[in-house]
Image (cartoon, grey):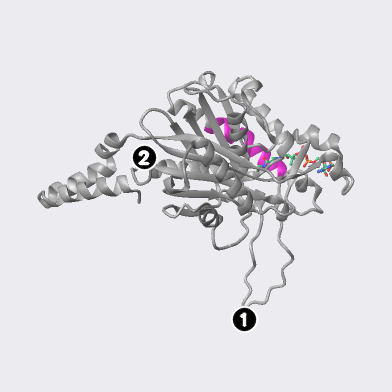
């Protein structure tokens, strides 16, 4: 717990102890359910971004030498021209680099961090969490660190969790990341999936701010459709059950995921923009999960917003699941596209199935 909050809580606790029990209970309830929230009223503001892509670039033409595919098929169906794939890099090493760049961009040190949340489906270890590896590597001794698995919505879920902690007054400054080494979990003999994905990490530092930050968010899950984008874990294997298991890889029913994306994403964005008290026209940029240019074009059409408000990184990164949104945001930030006061809508969607959107004031 951060020092400012601890001190604040101790004062309130002492106050409450000095009151009759019923009044102490009422104040406790009000702090949790209304009055406290009004009093705290903090927004979650992104104050810095960073990203890291592996050094090695693999083009569509490179892939067409390895399997029955072509630049024509990949680029016309998806918009992807190339992706970065790891050689020496790991999910943790890319996360650490992205984290350092985000902290430098934000002007904070590791000591300032209360919380680290990292979205990934391709960590280096089952345990420890990749977030704990990042914590150790950057020396964020005070931070609570954990991973979440919400597939391509992972960064957005991490942002919304950090927002909940910040709004509750529990933490003040958080590092959130999306990081993937998808190339180790895709089947390189399945041309319908392996050409789509890439490796990389993106990060953002968020902190409590009285004036601007997150205006609204929406998130959801539909576990009944989990099988349309799945990667099995280890099968049961113990003295009672002996399992011979072929290495499990990602399997995707592309058309089902496509249908889900082009209906759910515009609806979620519409809902979030309305909840922020805005109309789609008021949004300066839409930073969407980078799965397929045709999905982005469809969302732009459904919201009646011109495509120039939808920046793209999938052409040179491919689909990097949880890392897509923060890498795109970092590219936008470093190109100087994001100016104070701008309204930016973010949206992630994918395995679970899961989806999440947010509208932020930069
Ligand atoms: O990040 C998580 C969210 N994921 C997504 O949002 C992905 C959503 N889905 C998609 O983006 C698209 O469905 C894909 C890009 C995955 C596939 O595009 P599609 O237009 O739905 O193609 P398809 O799967 O229907 O395949 C069409 C044809 C098939 O051949 P036939 O059966 O028509 O003869 C495939 O075998 O294209 C063939 N094909 C390929 N051909 C050359 C599939 N993969 C390849 C390939 N190269 N890499």
Q: Residue at x 32, y 34 (%)?
A: 41
Q: Residue at x 62, y 81 (%)?
A: 239
Residue 267 within the segment the image draws in magenta? yes
Q: CA distance from mark 1 to mark 2?
A: 48 Å
Q: Residues within 10 Å of mark 1 (few under 14, many from 20)?
A: few
Q: Is residue 311 among the parts visible in the rendering?
A: yes
Quarter location, residue 309: top right
Foreground residue among 60 and 246: 60
Q: Is residue 208 left or right of residue 268?
A: left
Quarter location, residue 31: top left
Per the image, the residue denoted by label 2 is: 167
Where residue 160 appears, x then y in whole percent? 46, 41
Q: Residue at x 13, y 49 (%)?
A: 22
Q: Which residues are magenta?
A: 254-268
Where residue 282 appears, x then y in whole percent? 51, 19
Dots 1 and 2: beta carbons under 8 Å? no
Q: Is residue 67 left or right of residue 195?
A: right
Where residue 217 appears, x then y in whole percent? 46, 35
Where residue 200 appears, x then y in whole percent? 66, 45
Label whose residue precedes the other's in the sequence (1 or 2):
2
Classified by dominant secondary structure, the portion drawn in magenta counts as: helix
Secondary structure beneath dot 1 equals loop
């Amino acid at each position: 717990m951060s020092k400012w909050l601890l001190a604040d809580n101790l004062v309130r606790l002492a106050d409450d102890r000095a009151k009759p029990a019923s009044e102490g209970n009422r104040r406790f309830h009000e702090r949790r359910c209304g009055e406290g929230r009004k009093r705290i009223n903090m927004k979650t503001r992104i104050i810095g971004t960073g990203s890291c892509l592996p050094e090695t670039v693999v083009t569509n033409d490179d892939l067409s030498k390895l399997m029955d595919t072509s630049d024509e098929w990949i680029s016309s169906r998806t918009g992807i021209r190339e992706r970065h794939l790891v050689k020496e890099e790991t999910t943790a090493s890319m996360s650490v680099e992205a984290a350092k760049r985000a902290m430098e961009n934000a002007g904070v040190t590791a000591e300032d961090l209360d919380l680290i949340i990292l979205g990934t489906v391709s960590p280096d270890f089952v345990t420890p969490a990749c977030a704990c590896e990042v914590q150790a590597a950057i020396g964020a001794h005070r931070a609570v660190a954990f991973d979440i698995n919400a597939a391509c919505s992972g960064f957005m879920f991490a942002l919304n969790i950090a927002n909940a902690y910040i709004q509750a007054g529990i933490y003040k400054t958080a590092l959130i990341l999306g990081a993937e080494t998808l190339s180790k979990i895709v089947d390189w003999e399945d041309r319908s999936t392996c050409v789509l994905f890439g490796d990389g990490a993106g990060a953002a530092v968020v902190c409590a701010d009285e004036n601007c930050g997150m205006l609204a968010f929406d998130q959801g899950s539909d576990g009944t459709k989990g099988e349309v984008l799945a990667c099995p874990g280890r099968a049961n294997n113990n003295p009672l059950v002996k399992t011979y298991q072929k290495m499990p890889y990602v399997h995707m029913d592309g058309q089902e995921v496509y249908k889900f994306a082009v209906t759910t994403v515009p609806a979620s964005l519409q809902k979030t923009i309305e909840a922020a008290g805005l109309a789609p026209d008021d949004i300066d940029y839409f930073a969407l999960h980078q799965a397929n240019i045709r999905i982005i074009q469809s969302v732009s059409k459904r919201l009646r917003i011109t495509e120039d408000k939808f920046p793209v990184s999938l052409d040179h990164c491919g689909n990097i699941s949880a890392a897509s949104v923060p890498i795109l945001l970092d590219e936008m930030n470093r190109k100087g596209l994001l100016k104070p006061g701008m309204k930016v809508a973010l949206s992630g969607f994918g395995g679970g199935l899961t989806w999440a959107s947010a509208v932020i004031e930069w």
